[in-house]
Amino acid sequence: QAVLTQPSSLSASPGASASLTCTLRSGFNVGTYRIYWYQQKPGSPPQYLLRYKSDSDNHQGSGVPSRFSGSKDASANAGILLISGLQSEDEADYYCMIWHSSTSLFGGGTKLTVL
Amino acid sequence: QVQLVQSGAEVKKPGASVKVSCKASGYTFSDHYMHWVRQAPGQGPEWMGWVNPNSGGTYYAQNFQDRVTMTRDTSINTAYMELSKLGSADTAIYYCAREGVAAAEDTFDMWGLGTLVIVSS
């Protein structure tokens, strides 16, 4: 079982909000990790969006709009990427990542469709 | 501007090795660790390890420890990743990714465009 699990796809309408989840496998407590989020569009490399551990420990990537934000759902042991005011340009694959024991681990990604 | 320019696509036979380069420009090469991440078709990224351009020190993911070598040449601001004993499962796009510093530590804040490596007999 993968350490980070993401829904394979999600659809939302322009102007709406989308909540992308990244669930950590049992034994990996979301509260102890910084969750990193990357966006990837077809034919391009991933781009860093943001990092979130808590409201006092978070970082926004350079030039990333504030409508991209991070949070956590401790009860679900999950990190969340919230995208508000969806735009057509937000259609992309989104990957979460953590560092565990000096090793970077990525989730399988969520394909976000804006329609 | 900050750029990471990678070498061109490669086609290799099973059992061979491949060496991918990543030339950095627009920033001080020695100030940022360089990571290598690969992505197989239709899959998520897979981290391979890093090289410290300042010291040459390296750290590899366990999955690649016995067949990956990461090096750098500071005279030409270039990092290299060599992967040996290639198999079909190594067919992927290989990216170099710069690690951020200060508040952006542990983030991959700049990526190369990728190098496609195809392993086929």
Image (cartoon, grey):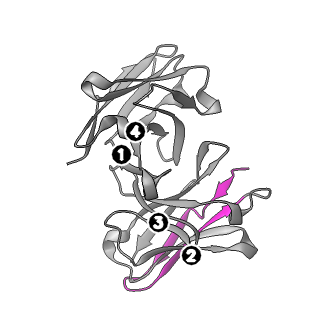
Nearest the viewer among A30 and A22 is A30
Q: For mark 4, name the chain.
A: B
Residue interval drawn in magenta: A1-24
Q: Are marks 4 and 3 on the same chain?
A: no
Q: CA distance from mark 1 to mark 4?
A: 7 Å
Determine the CA span between mark 3 and mark 2: 10 Å
- Tag 1: amino acid: Trp
Q: Is residue A8 magenta?
A: yes
Secondary structure type for disc 4: strand
Q: Please give left or right for residue A100 compared with residue B44 in the image.
A: right
- Do marks 3 and 1 both belong to one polypeptide chain? no
Circles 4 and 3: CB atoms closer than 8 Å = no
Q: Are marks 3 and 2 on the same chain?
A: yes
Q: How far apart are labels 3 and 1 at the CA level?
A: 18 Å
**In the current view of this chain or complex, which residue is farthest to the left?**
B1
Residue B95: image tag? 4
The residue to which callout 3 is attached is A59
Q: Amino acid at mark 4?
A: Tyr
Give the residue pinned by disc 1: B111
Q: Amino acid at mark 2?
A: Asp
Kindly indicate whether the residue at mark 4 contacts the one at mark 1 (C-beta within 8 angstroms): yes
Which of the labelled discs sits on residue A88, or is there none? Answer: none
The picture quadrant where one finds residue B8 is top left
Q: Which mark is residue A55?
A: 2
Subunit bearing disc 1? B
